Image (cartoon, rainbow, N blue to C red):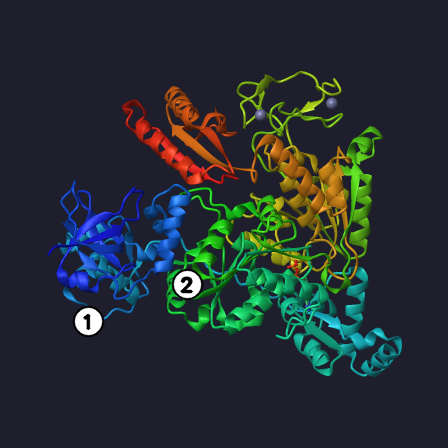
């Protein structure tokens, strides 16, 4: 009997591919093991075995595999099932999912670049013949493709050899290196608290009279404290007092001074009792935990809706503990790993070495290590924290999935395929494992809230900040009025300037938020703040310079740019938004003594740039931090007394049906950075439209009202969560061909799906890397079958692909596009 193996190739093939195997091979291959296979004229790939059968393929002659690469499956059945679901749901191929799921070290192929490892300690005598050939070749050439190595060794099956050499560290795979960031730990000193008492202090000063150098140190400390309220680094004290470390150390030993690190101490022995494992949940957290248990007992995912700083993380920690106690694995998903060193510290303090971190910026070797640890259910990887790619790990015994900040749109992968939403895919994953899912946010997405309201998800709520800390006091500043009365300096109202001055005076820090998202600016009237809206959709029109038009990205409505404001008739139309850089510049003039930092795309490009800015701000080396939405994400700064939003309108007017929901989320989140300790924080929002309903809802922290209103609008205009959206993007370098092709595609879709189809329409950036783009939106009502719709689309794609003149046109599907 002939045996055949169907494999998944890590490329965009619609189907599995069949290879011939021997009877012995059939006996040892199991699904999820890797095999090296030939493909095309001369390519070698690492493929994933799917299943064994005895039917020869009809249309091609099955080639033999080169080699089996694993002794045991590297990928579990759960994973294969999950990935198949992903491919089907997100309209891509299983191969594309496999390529993004497996660390690239597992997928060597003929094109992979291999380098020699200069640090390797190689005993040439111990190398096998062909290993030596590979090793030698790499001494003469800095890098070789695996295909080239295959020629040198004159063997097709070199992948196993190279895998072995990589494991031994003799050669390495080319990768962009990513090192871990170790924040610099500045040491600070303060006077021991008992000397806050005047009598004790007097005794101390009398005693120190006999030790002039020590006395000198203490006096200098007083001087420094009088000058500024910032923490005092040991190095500054040493320099200013003109003494030595030894003198300072003896004062510390005596208990006169105390030494501390801001960064780690906050986590380890901070204000709260974080150091102990027996953190006691407060009554609100306990109630929420009961609600969560109730949802879990009905096998539902649970949405935890807790205001900023309500102690959601502590609730997750208890759930994780319970999961570990049951001997199961836990997955903690975060929207962005760059910003989470704070959380990693916190979980490691609690769970120690059980915590592993996994994301695409880790080095290949680190990722392989975590993969193997998860696969073997090792103790070191019982809890995995990661960004979206962590859900691809080979869990076999998953008990809990935490999805933190579930409303964040960065959970959706935009490019390349699979264009999946990590939140939704993780819920499916948990289901496959019979694991519980907890989704947490202070500002839940409309989707998750709807699921909670319809009973599909359980719902738990915490309305109070932990430790009696008050919600920040949020006020709106009418800058239209302020401009009229000439009470503005640049983009700053007097109210904001006064508030900043006051906080700086009190030694507190300030965050200023300026959103400059979006490339196609809206045209705003600087007199009345009016922005032209689309009559058919609930979005602002965007300005397109080339054609001097205002356009709607959703329905294609357009009009010529007006010379004067449509609302007030004033000719003061402004196309340019202002950005963080300008805010920073103006601050320099308003507060010349303050240190101002900036966090946006431009300042966070470099290595560890994010982390450096965050730790500088934590260490109070900066007084004011100006930033884009990056500053809104889950950061926990202790000393921030004021958050200022420079202009809420640009966000509210962003041309997207989600603009209002997002504005609410962003403003609430950024406001949540203020006053996370005992003193009540303050938030000032500058706006032209203080009566805008979203701003009213933000100031009163009225999520429910926001939800109701937005839900109504989505119903009116048919947007998610009322409908599902599939976005089809067509790309081609030939402008006319693209237009023709997208018209063809859209009208074919319309024949079947009727008025569910919108467009084709140019996206805001209509040309990327020399290719023109056009989008078609398909809105699928909840009562229509999603899979039937997808089948219709696929059928149309087939006819489309058969038209030879459209051959060059690329099609991209984005299911649940957000
Ligand atoms: P959230 O995740 O909801 O923003 P956090 O979990 O960060 O809130 O909690 C805010 C602060 O309150 C943190 O400093 C945390 O250590 C502290 N905290 C929360 N719950 C407790 C508890 N039960 N006991 C002690 N401290 C707590
Ligand atoms: Zn106007
Ligand atoms: Zn429109």
Left or right: 97 in relation to 464: left
Q: Quadrant of ligand 2?
A: top right
Q: Which of the two residues, 508 or 676, is positioned nearer the viewer here? A: 676
Q: Nearer the viewer, residue 63 or 517?
A: 63
> Local crowd at mark 1 within 10 Å, few (<14), some, or many (≥20)?
few
Task: Kindly state the secondary structure of the residue where label 1 is placed.
Answer: helix
Q: Secondary structure at mark 2?
A: loop
Decide: is 778 above or below 551.
Answer: below
The answer to whether 656 appears left or right of 3 in the picture is: right
- Across and down, in percent, residue 679 comes to 79, 59
Indicate if the residue with disc 2 has its beta carbon within 8 Å of ligand 1: no
Tell me the residue that label 2 is attached to.
395
Compared to residue 567, the image places residue 205 above or below, namely: below
- What number is the disc on residue 586? none
Residue 126, numbered label: 1
Residue that lies at the very extreme toward the left in this rendered image: 1
Q: Nearer the viewer, residue 496 or 523?
A: 523
- Residue 468 % position (x, y): 77, 62
Find the distance from the CA under tag 2 to the CA under tag 1: 37 Å
The 10 Å Cα crowd at callout 2, few under 14, some 14 to 19, many 20 or more, is many
Asked if residue 18 can be seen in this view, the reply is yes
Q: Is residue 495 above or below residue 367?
A: above
Judged left or right of residue 400, residue 70 is left
| Residue 263 visible, this orientation | no
Q: Is residue 419 left or right of residue 158?
A: right
Which residue is located at x 75 percent, y 26 percent? 528
Q: To which quarter of the image does residue 34 belong? A: bottom left
């Amino acid at each position: 009997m002939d045996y055949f193996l169907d494999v998944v190739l890590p490329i965009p093939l619609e189907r599995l591919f069949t290879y011939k195997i021997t009877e012995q091979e059939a006996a040892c291959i199991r699904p999820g093991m890797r095999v090296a296979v030939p493909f095309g004229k001369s390519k070698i790939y690492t493929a994933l075995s799917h299943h064994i059968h005895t039917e020869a393929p009809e249309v091609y002659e099955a080639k033999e595999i080169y080699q089996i690469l694993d002794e045991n499956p590297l990928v579990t059945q759960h994973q294969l099932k999950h990935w198949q679901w992903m491919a089907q749901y997100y309209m891509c191929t299983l191969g594309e999912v496999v390529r993004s799921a497996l660390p690239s070290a597992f997928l060597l192929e003929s094109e992979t670049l291999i380098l020699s490892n200069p640090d390797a300690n190689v005993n040439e005598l111990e190398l096998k013949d062909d290993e030596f050939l590979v090793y030698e070749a790499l001494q003469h050439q800095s890098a070789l493709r695996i295909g080239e190595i295959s020629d040198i060794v004159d063997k097709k099956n070199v992948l196993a050899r190279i895998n072995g050499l990589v494991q031994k560290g003799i050669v390495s795979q080319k990768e962009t290196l990513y090192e871990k960031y170790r924040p610099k730990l500045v040491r600070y000193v303060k006077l021991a608290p008992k000397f806050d008492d005047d009598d004790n202090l007097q005794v101390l000063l009398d005693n120190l009279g006999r030790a002039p150098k020590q006395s000198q140190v203490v006096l200098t400390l007083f001087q420094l404290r009088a000058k500024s309220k910032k923490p005092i680094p040991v190095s500054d004290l040493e320099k200013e007092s003109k003494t030595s470390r030894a003198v300072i150390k003896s004062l510390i030993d005596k208990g006169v001074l105390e030494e501390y690190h801001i960064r780690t101490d906050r986590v380890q022995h901070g204000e709260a009792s974080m150091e102990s494992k027996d953190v006691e949940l407060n009554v609100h957290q306990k109630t929420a935990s009961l609600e969560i248990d109730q949802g879990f007992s009905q096998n539902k995912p649970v949405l935890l809706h807790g205001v900023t700083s309500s102690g959601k993380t502590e609730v997750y920690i208890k759930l994780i503990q319970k999961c570990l106690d049951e001997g199961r694995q836990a997955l903690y998903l975060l929207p962005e790993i760059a910003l989470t060193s704070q959380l990693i510290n916190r979980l490691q303090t609690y769970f120690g070495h059980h915590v592993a971190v996994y994301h695409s910026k880790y080095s290949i070797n680190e990722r392989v290590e975590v993969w193997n640890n998860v696969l073997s259910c090792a103790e070191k990887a019982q809890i995995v924290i990661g960004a979206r790619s962590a859900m691809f790990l080979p869990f076999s015994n998953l008990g809990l999935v935490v999805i933190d900040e579930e409303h964040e749109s960065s959970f959706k992968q935009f490019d390349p395929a699979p264009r999946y939403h990590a939140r939704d895919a993780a819920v499916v994953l948990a289901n496959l494992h019979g694991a519980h899912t907890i989704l947490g946010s202070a500002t839940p997405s409309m989707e998750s809230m709807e699921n909670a309201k319809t009973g599909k998800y359980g719902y738990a709520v915490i309305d109070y900040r932990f430790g009696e800390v008050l919600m920040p006091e949020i006020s709106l500043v009418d800058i239209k009025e302020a401009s009229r009365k000439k009470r503005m300096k640049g983009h700053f109202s007097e109210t904001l300037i006064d508030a900043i001055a006051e906080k700086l005076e009190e030694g507190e820090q300030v965050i200023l938020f300026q959103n400059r998202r979006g490339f196609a600016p809206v045209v705003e009237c600087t007199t009345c703040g009016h922005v032209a809206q689309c009559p058919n959709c609930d979005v602002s029109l965007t300005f397109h310079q080339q054609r001097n038009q205002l356009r709607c990205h959703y329905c294609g409505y357009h009009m010529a740019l007006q010379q004067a404001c449509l609302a007030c008739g004033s000719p003061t139309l402004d196309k340019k938004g202002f950005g963080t850089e300008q805010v920073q510049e103006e601050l320099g003039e308003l507060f010349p003594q303050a240190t101002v930092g900036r966090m946006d795309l431009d300042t966070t490009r470099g290595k560890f740039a994010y982390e450096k800015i965050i730790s500088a701000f934590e260490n109070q080396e900066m007084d004011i931090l100006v930033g884009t939405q990056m500053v809104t994400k889950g950061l926990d700064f202790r000393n921030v007394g004021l958050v200022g939003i420079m202009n809420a309108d640009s966000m509210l007017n962003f041309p997207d049906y989600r603009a209002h929901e997002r504005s609410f989320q962003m403003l609430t989140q950024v406001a949540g950075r203020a006053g996370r300790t005992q003193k009540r924080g303050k938030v000032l929002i500058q706006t032209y439209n203080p009566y805008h309903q979203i701003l009213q809802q933000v100031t009163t922290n009225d999520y429910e009202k926001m939800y109701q209103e937005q839900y109504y609008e989505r119903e009116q205009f048919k947007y998610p969560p009322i409908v599902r959206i599939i976005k089809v993007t067509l790309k081609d370098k030939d402008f006319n061909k693209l237009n023709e092709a997208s018209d063809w595609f859209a009208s074919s879709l319309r024949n079947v799906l009727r008025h569910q189809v919108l467009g084709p329409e140019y996206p805001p950036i209509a040309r990327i890397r020399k290719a023109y783009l056009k989008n078609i939106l398909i809105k699928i009502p909840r009562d229509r079958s999603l899979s039937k719709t997808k089948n219709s689309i696929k059928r149309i794609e087939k006819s489309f692909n058969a038209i030879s003149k459209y051959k060059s046109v690329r099609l991209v599907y984005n299911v649940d596009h957000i």
